[in-house]
Amino acid sequence: MTKKTAFRIFLIGTISSAALFLWATYDTQRQVATLSHVDKLSDQVVAGKRAFQKYNCNDCHTILGFGGYYAPDLTKVVQRVGEEGIRYRLKSPELAFADSPRKMPNQHLSDQEIKDLVAFFSWVGEINNNDWPPQDSKKRLSRGEQMMVAKVGVSPGAAVFQTKGCMNCHSLHGTGGTFGPALDKIGASLSAEEIGKYVRNPKGVNPNAKMPSQKDNLSERELDEVASFLATLK
Amino acid sequence: MEYRSQKIAYWYFAAALPLFVLQVVVGLWLAASYTFTIPQSIVNVFPFATARAFHTNLLVLWMLLGFMGGTYYIIPEETKSEIYSTNLAWFQLIALLVTGVTALVGFLFGWTQGRPLLEIPMALDFVVVIGALVFLFNVGMTMLKAKNWTAIQGTLLGGLVFLALLYLFGIPFYRNLVIDWYYWWWVIHLWVEGAWELVTAAIFAFVLMKLTGVERQVVEKWLYVEIGLFLFTGLAGTGHHYYWIGAPRYWLWIGGIFSALEPVPILLMVFDTMHHVKERKEKIVNPLTWTYAIGCAVLHFIGAGVWGFLHTLPQINYYTHGSQVTVSHGHLAFFGAYALLNLMTFYYAMPKLKGIAEYDDRRGKIGFWTMCSSMMIMGLTFGVAGVLQSYIERVLGMGYMVAQGYMRLWMGVTMVAGVFFLGGLLTTVVDLFTLRPAKVQT
C-alpha cells in the first residue's frame, strides 16, 4: 500500500461517514418535532429547563440517561413519583431524604420555579424515546412480573409491588423507600377494598395525601392484585 | 530541544500537571460521596454536582493544556522553524488558565450553565473561543510561513480546527431537551472520538517516529489509514448516544453498526505501534517513554475499544445506559487514550527541554505501574457496580436507592483504588518536575 492509497482510504472513510451523519442530522431535525411533541413545548416548559440548568440538577441526576449518576434518572419522574412527590422533594429535600443515605441540597426554589420544573418534567416524560428507562417501562416490566410469578413463586400482587415503583416510597421489612409509610402491617388496619380505593384516588380518601393516584401507572388488574397482596400483611 | 521556542511547551505541561492532581483529589471526594453518607449541611453548600463539575472540567482543562503544549513542542521540529509568536503562546496560556480558575471558583457560587461537562457560563465560553482562535492563528501561521507540509502537521491542524468548531455547538441555550442533547454530543463525542483522536494520533505518530527512527513515509501512511478509520467509525458512531433521547429509530442501526467497528482503528494502532517498536532503527534510550507509548496503545484499546464495544449495542445499552458501566468505560478510556498520551508526551519532551539525554526512571516506573494497575482495578469495580445497578434497578426494577445500597461496597473499593492512583500520580508529577540524569553504569 502506498501513501497515496492510504490518503484515499482516509478521504473515502471520512466523507462517506460525514455524509451519512449529516443526512441523518437533517432528517432528525425534521422528525424531532413529532417525537418530542414540540406543540406542547410551552414557555413554562422552557422556563423549567432554565431552572433545571440554573441549579445544575443535571450533575447529580441523569435525564434521558445523561448527566451525573449520583441520583435517580428524571426522564419519567412524573410517572414514578407524581407531581406532588416532585414538589415535596424540591421544597423540603431535608425532610424527604431524612432517612436516606444520600441527600439532596435545598436550593430554596421559588414556587414559580417548582411549577416550571414540574411542567418541564411532564413534557420530558412524554418524549418518544424507544421506551427508556427500562425500570419505568410498562411494557418490559409486566414481562418481568410474569417471570417472577412463574419462577420465584411470589403472588402476582407482590410482584407488582416490587416492580411497579411502590418501593420507591414504601418499604417492607426495612427494604424500600422512606418517603411514604412502611407497609409491613397495613393489612391489620385496612381491607383489600379500602386499599384498592385508596391507591386509585388517595386524595379522595385523605385530602392531605401526598401519594399520587396509581390509576395511570397500573392497570385495573394490577391495582386489584396489589391491594389483595397488601391486605394479607398483618 | 532543537528550537528555542519549544521551551514554551514546558510551561503548558507545568500548568497541566497540578490540575490533574486536583482532578484526582476531587475524584476521591466523589467516590467518598457514594461510599459514606454526607450530611445535609455539607450537601447544601458543596453538592455532589459542584464537585462533579470540578472533576470533569479539570480533566478537559489539563488535557487541552497538555495537547497545546505537545503541539507547541512538535511544530517547530515538524516545520523546521521557530513558533510564529511565543508572546501569543504565553498570552493564550494565561488566558486559558485564568478562564479555567474563574470558572471553577464560579461553580462554587452557582455560576454555571448547568449542562454536564459544558458547565462553563456563556461569558467565559467567549474567552475560550478567543483563546482557541489565538492558538489556531499561532499554529497555522507557523506552518504557513515554514511551508514544510507533512501529514502529521495536517492531521494536527485539522484536528485542532475541528475541535474549535465543534465547541461552538455547545454554547447556545436550546429550548428543546432532545435537540440540546443532540448537539451536546457534537461537542463531547465528536471531541473525544473525532477531534481529540486526530490531535493525539498526530502527536503519537510524531513521538513514535522520533523514538523508533522508523521512516516518516511508513509512519504517515499508517496515520492516514488510522485517522480515516477513526473518522469513518467515529462520525456516524455518534449515533450510539442517540438511542434513547427521542431521535428517530434508525439511530439504533447507525449507532450500533458504526460503533461496533470503533475498536478497529484502535487495534490497528496497537499493531502498528508494536510493529514500529519491533522494526526500530534507534536503540531504546529511555525505556519508560517507550513503556508509556505501548501502555497508551494497549489501554486505549482496552478502555475505549473493548469497554466501549461491550455496552454499545442497543440491546445491551438499553439496560446499561446512564449507569456506572458508563463511568467504568469513561475512566478507562480517558486514562488509556488521553491521560497516558499526555504523560507519554511529557516524558518524551520534558527531559529534552531540560537538556537531559538519559533520565533516571526508577520513580517514574513506580508511578506508571501504580497508576495503571489502580486504574484497571477502578475500571473493574466501577464495572461491577454498574452491572449490579443495571440488573437490580433496570432488570428487576427494584428502585434506584435499593440498587445503590448493593453498589456501595464496590464504590468503597473504588475509593481505595483511587487513593493508590493518587499516590502513583503524585510520584509521577514529582518525578517529572525533578527529572535527573541517569547514573552512568560502570
Image (cartoon, grey):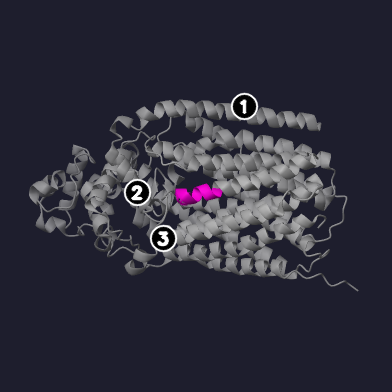
Residue at x-position 57% and y-position 43%: B191
Residues A167 and B219: in front is B219
Q: Residues within 10 Å of mark 2 (few under 14, many from 20)?
A: many
The disc numbered 1 marks a residue on which chain?
A
Circle 3 residue:
B48
The region drawn magenta spans B116-128
Which tag, 2 or 1, sits closer to the chain's start? 1
The residue that mark 2 highlights is A52
- Which residue was labeled with disc 1? A16
Position of the C terminus of chain B by quadrant: bottom right
Image point (62%, 69%), residue name: B426
Image quadrant holding the N terminus of chain B, namely bottom right
B259 or A170: nearer the viewer:
B259
The image quadrant of residue A60 is bottom left
Q: Nearer the viewer, mark 2 or mark 3?
A: 2
Image coordinates of residue A66 in percent, x first then y, are 43, 46
Q: Tell me the subunit letter for badge 2.
A: A
A102 is higher (above) or lower (below) than B157: below
